Structure formats: structure tokens, C-alpha cells
Image (tube, helix red, strand yellow):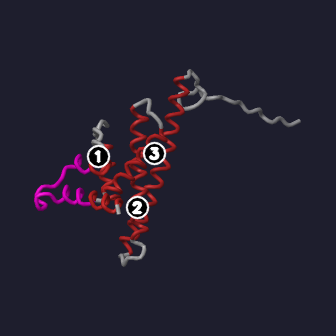
Amino acid sequence: MDRQKKEQAAEDELTATIYRDSGENVPTTDELWSLLHGEPMPSANRPVGLARRSEEAWASLIAGPDMAGWDALEEQLGLFRKGLGDSESPIEQMLADQIVISWLEVHYFGTRSAETAHEEMTVPHREFLLRGADRAQRRLVFLTKQFLTIRSMLRSNRNGSRESGPAAKPRVTTRRRATTR
């Protein structure tokens, strides 16, 4: 019984927050975050640039108005960014941002293709989704290769090694001519 009362009280509080004043005033994101997480909303300390705006646009297509979907997607993006590691140069950061955006594109097109698999859809629309998924996947693989190449080059240059990358001196080999006797 006590658990039911607590759940009902939490539901009443959420309903009152969302629909206070007969729905005329909509609660702020900070208020909803505090209510759902039991703590103040963290400040947005990450820079807002074009890459972040693109991420948010793709995320809004994926999650829509679902706050739980946004939270899950933000958590996945955080883990994905953490897996890429810290960027040591602007080019490396740009590629990392593009990788995250491409990952969101792959996720969107894959999800959308799967969600609409049983719907009546025109052939061009279905082909659009499948081509979009294919292009996004190829772009993700390409950007990941470029990112790893740049990171490798930066690390080898930082360590003083010149064995790899375009800055390396080309090795010249000579071929022996076959002689006939």
C-alpha cells in the first residue's frame, strides 16, 4: 500500500507540474529534469557549434519528443565520444564530430528503414531510405579510417618518428636487371 501511495504521489506531482494552471504554462526543461532525475539539470558546458546543431537535428529525428529517447541517445553519444578519446588537434576534433554525426545518420536510416518495413510505401521512398542507410554507413567507415590515419600521423610526429604517413621519406628501391649469359 505504501508503495502505491508513493507512486500515486509522484504521478500527481508530475501531472501537476506538466499541466499546472490548466495547461497554460508549460514547465521548463530544467523543472522537468529536476523532477525526473531528482537533481538540478547540469549546465550545458559543451560548445554549441555547427556540429552540435547537426547532432541535435539528427537526434530530434531519431528520438522525436520522447525525453527518455533523448536521454538514452545522449548517453550513447557520450559513450561513443568517450570511445573516440580526446582530440589533440582541430582536424582530429572535426573528424570526431563528423563521425558522431555519421553514426547518428546510420542510426536514423537504419531505424527508419526497420520501422517502415511493414508499411505501404512507394518504391522510390523505400529506395531513398535504403540508399541513405548505405551512404551513411560508407561515410562512417571512411571517416573512421581518416580519423585513425590522422591520429596515427599526429602521434608519430609527436613522438619524433617519421616512419608512416605522407611526411615520411619515400623508400627508393632499385631492381636488379636480369642478366642473360
Question: Mark 1 to mark 3: distance in Å?
Answer: 17 Å
Q: Is residue 25 magenta?
A: yes
Residue under the point 34% across and 59% down? 2
Pointer 2 residue: 109
Label 3 sits on what residue type?
Answer: Phe
Nearer to the camera, 63 or 164: 63
**Magenta residues: mostly which secondary structure?**
helix
Q: Which residues are magenta?
A: 11-33
> Residue 97, position in %: x, y?
39, 42
| Disc nearest the viewer among 2 and 3 | 3
Pointer 3 residue: 80
Residue under the point 39% across and 53% down? 72
Q: Are marks 1 and 3 in contact (CB under 8 Å)?
A: no
Pointer 1 residue: 53
Marked residue nearer the N-terminal end (2 or 1)? 1
Marked residue nearer the N-terminal end (1 or 3)? 1
Q: On the rendered image, what quadrant is the C terminus found in?
A: top right
